[in-house]
Image: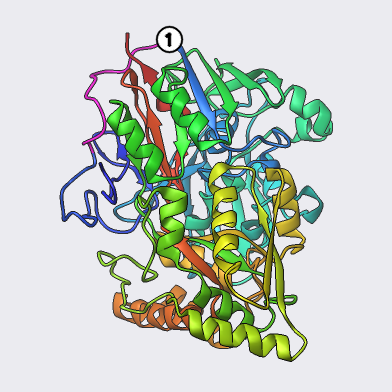
Amino acid sequence: MIRHRRIVAVFAAACSAALVLGACGSGGDSGSENNSTAATVEAGEPVAGGTARILQMGEPRSLDPAALSNTWPHQPLLGNALYGTLMVTNNDTFELEYKMATDFSTEDGGKTFTLTLQPDLVFSDGTPLDAAAVKYNWDRLKDPTLGSTTIRQAVEVESTEVVDPLTMRVTMVEPNPQFGQALVAGALNWVASPAALEQGRESFDRNPIGAGPFTLVNWARQDAVELEKNPQYWDAPKPYLDSLTVRTVADANQRSNTMTTGGADLTAETSWTNVNKADAAGLQYVVTSTGGGQFAGMNQRRAPFDDERARRAVSLAVDLEAVNTVVYNGEGEVPTSFFPEDSPFYADIPLGETNVEEAQTLFDELAAEGKPVKFTFLSYPTTESRVLAEAIQAQLSAFENVEMNVEVTDFAAVTARAGARDFDMLISSAVTQDPDYALSMAFTADSTGNFMGVDNPELDAALERGRFGATQEERKAAYDEVQQILAESVVGLWYTRALPSVTFSEDTHGVQLFSLGSTLPEELWISN
């Protein structure tokens, strides 16, 4: 079994472009063994042709970039296929590596940036992809009616200005020298044709126009998205494949069974259980190492979790190792500290503890004040999300004066309600590589990504010191304080380290990840 091996994605012959903490081959629980190539097959030079059958976990509500999410449980490969990428990030240095862009730099500490594009970029219909097209897409993502998860990054931009066809000047609301880390993790990295978007969603979904390595042939909702090679793609001779067939499979067991029986060539994954199954079946896998993790977040904007005692009571009542056993067969990693021990930001600050007696005391205290703890867990339709909710519910049922219900709905509905802050508890994340983007986005009081409604001036100040620290020591001191505040205020139940990963067949090669498990489809190829 390969439990807890920390494996980093391979990028060409070296490291992946995933945003990860630490160096290539950093050790997990089993030591410093270099696993960067342990689960991949050496296959020589790429071979052109063929079709890859891809599984993703979330059905998109639209092919509009604003409706897609560039994280591993959603539609990152599909977005990259249709729209390409402006840039990615190197996991060793956190430096930007350019694709359709050639530069994204600041000379004033992150108040303004200059974005420069490759010359002669065109959309799949032959029209130019220029700075005006990028401006249109970036400005549009600020519109809250789109319901885009990327609004969290987009609203950090105060204005955009076209300097010339290849150059756009970006002015930030507040200086942020780390903004490139945020850019690559969302739809700001994808550019669609403004003219096509102006035709409306129905028209665009029939014929999405991007500049990615593939174009749409057909989208049968709840079935498959069929794509073919884009002859206009800027980075010829890529893509190597002739076509892709992308299907949505939310059920973890079904994904695993489909892969192990040869029904698909590559799937995104979320748990060690399925990665272990893939390994046992002789499949390949790539895992992006991260800090932070996923948590069952509590909405502090409304009862019952506007009272810190309610949050603390639930946290004390739930045994997360028992949850790990139920959800991941004990194969997940429950974060005991925010950063892993091999991180330069590690501090021995426990994220939580279990104390059933204290939990019951708090539940009783709140009930006596007329505030019994009653809430609903809003669950995604995936097996993991549903089983997690039910595992927490089962444990809480042993206590008095607390009632938890579970509501399972589709990805689009959960995303919309999260954006509207219409929930009590749901799965959220603060998955860290360089800490700034994930932590500031998730927990700064005025951040649109602050779904839990955290409002703590001391936390905001510590996050700002971490962003602008001139030395590693200054940044670490700031993030030590951040960890302490997050642990004491209880933002949620930190139930697992995130596992941005893919498993793939022995004949599939060129798997490269960036950001949170985002696969570059132009690099994929299949051997005979």
Question: Which residue position is annotated with label 1?
Answer: 49
Q: Amino acid at mark 1?
A: Gly
- Quadrant containing the C terminus is top left
- Give percent across and percent down for residue 450: 63, 68
Q: Position of residue 229 (x, y in %)?
A: 54, 16
Way the structure is coloured: rainbow
* The quarter of the displayed image where residue 281 is located: top left
Residue at image location 35% in from the left, 43% down from the top: 287
| Along the viewing direction, whichever of 429 and 471 lies nearer the viewer | 429
**In this view, 276 is above or below 109:** above
Q: Tell me: 295 left or right of 196.
A: left
Image vertical order of residue 134 relative to residue 347, above or below: above
The quarter holding residue 282 reads: top left
Location of residue 215 in the rendering, given as x and y in whole percent from the top left corner: 61, 21
Q: Is residue 499 magenta?
A: no
Foreground residue among 346 and 81: 346
Q: Residues within 10 Å of mark 1 (few under 14, many from 20)?
A: some
Q: Is residue 101 left or right of residue 63?
A: left
| Quadrant the N terminus occupies | top left
Residue under the point 64% across and 48% down: 380
Q: Is residue 454 visible?
A: yes
Residue 462 visible in the displayed image: no
Indicate the secondary structure of the residue bearing disc 1.
Answer: loop
Q: Which residue is painted at 63% across and 22% down in the image?
A: 225
Q: Residue at x 82, y 26 (%)?
A: 203
Q: Which residues are magenta?
A: 37-48
Q: Position of residue 219 (x, y in %)?
A: 69, 21
Q: Give above or below for 77 relative to 439.
A: above
